[in-house]
Image: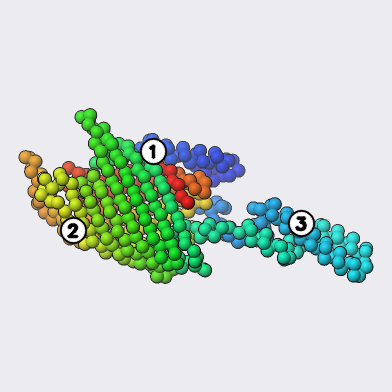
Amino acid sequence: MLTIFLFDQQLFTYYDRHILIVYCFMTIFIEQRYYYFLILCLMIFISALPFRFAFSADKSEITKDYIKENFPDVYKEIFDEGRAEGLKDHSAAVEKTGSTSHTKVKKNNIMKDNEKPLQATKSASSPQKIKAVQPAAKEELGQWWRRSSLNYDPMPEKWLFHTEIQYSFVDKTGNDDGYAHSGDFFTALRKARFTNYLSYKIEKYDFDQSDGEVSSDDYQMFEESLRFDLTKRLYAQAGFFWERDDTYLVEDRDTWYGGFGYQIVDNKRYGLDLFLSYGHQKEEYNSIIVELMDLSEEKTGVTYLSERFNLNITEKLSFIDSFRLIYNLDESGIYEADDAGNYYRVDEEKRYRWTWINSLDYKMNKYLSLVATFKIDYDNNPWPSVLNRDERLQLSMKLSY
């Protein structure tokens, strides 16, 4: 049923499919069953592949049939101009030869033949008509900010700019259970082989506790990076990101990194990107940590690994999977508390943190999308009384241009 509802354009209208998509996302969120999201991802992935509109044709190719199907008014205008041009040329020839009977036969043939007038459009005005229906340059590039600049021939000479703004309603489980709001901002700027990325994320949580008190959590992240494309698949990238995480009692976390990425798959339908880098991290901790454990900050070298996979299931629906791992190269302490509430450093180990995100993005129109996201944050060595795993299910509206 899901396959029929989503993809049968004969049975269901444009607005019917929009309503159903919104209903599916809201059901996942309200029911708070995370595995519903994974099942929906799998069902849509399987059901979308056989359908004819799943990128079976290259829409950027301007042919006679493409113009006739998508731009009937333009096709008719070209046809009429071609017919008029043919009649005009033949009339001139008749005036020279004086063959009136031949003119009538030839005129009838031109009126009946629907293909010949299109061939006559090689006049001075017809190329302008075909050029007018070509896609805009930005649309032809697709999601250029996710692809190598060297994949485009010729490489765009002008500045390219893309922005995304996203508002999310979040259901969080783990260290705190409850609902929250978050906002995301992302922008990309490209000139030749250089691409600059800037993003900012903020999450605000207010949770009612059993004793009637309200606990507030705040998470913020700012990231700035610069990429240079070395080949069609290999690139170098360096950047910086800053985080504040109340859940893990981090007041300030600064991370600098630089490394290389490789785009294993890079086309309009699929994309798979791996990035590996070395960096340096500095953490400053909450006053609670300073008081109980006599620890104000830590510095360490880090290995930063990220992966991103995107699948354009249809022209409107896409699936995005991303994974980020930060592995500390220096050991950090393992703390435990005794019965009196005193904390002791009992051992050391290398700490690592990872984030895994899966999203379904449904494009409602050129600028507006509905996004459902399932996110897991994991820390192998959190502070005592802090859980090492948080889960979020969020429903978002995204504006992109």
Q: Nearer the observer, disc 1 or disc 3?
A: 3
Q: Can you name the residue that lies furthest to the left here?
A: 340
Residue at 44 percent of width and 64 percent of height = 191
Q: Which residue is mark 3?
A: 80
Tell whether 45 sits left or right of 389: right
Whether pointer 2 and pointer 1 mark residues with C-beta atoms closer than 8 Å, the reply is no
Q: Which residue is mark 1?
A: 29
Residue 315 lies, in percent from the top left, at 52, 51
What is the distance, in whole Å, between disc 2 and disc 3 at their CAs? Answer: 75 Å
Task: Look at the image and tell me whether residue 61 can be seen.
Answer: yes
Please tell me how crowded label 2 is: few (under 14), some (14-19), or many (20+) other residues with Cα within 10 Å: some
Q: Which quadrant holds residue 283? A: bottom left
What is the distance, in whole Å, between disc 2 and disc 1 at their CAs? Answer: 39 Å
What is the distance, in whole Å, between disc 1 and disc 3 at their CAs? Answer: 55 Å
- When the figure is inspected, residue 241 is found, relative to residue 206, above or below; the finding is below
Of the image marks 2 and 3, the number of the one nearer the N terminus: 3
Please tell me how crowded label 3 is: few (under 14), some (14-19), or many (20+) other residues with Cα within 10 Å: some
Q: Which quadrant holds residue 33? A: top left
Whether pointer 2 and pointer 3 mark residues with C-beta atoms closer than 8 Å, the reply is no
Q: Secondary structure at mark 2?
A: strand
Of the image marks 2 and 1, the number of the one nearer the N terminus: 1
Residue 100 lies, in percent from the top left, at 93, 64
Residue at 73 percent of width and 54 percent of height = 76
Whether pointer 1 and pointer 3 mark residues with C-beta atoms closer than 8 Å, the reply is no
Please tell me how crowded label 1 is: few (under 14), some (14-19), or many (20+) other residues with Cα within 10 Å: many
Q: Secondary structure at mark 3?
A: helix
Q: Which residue is mark 2?
A: 299
Tell whether 337 sits left or right of 54: left
Three-letter amino acid code at disc 3? Asp
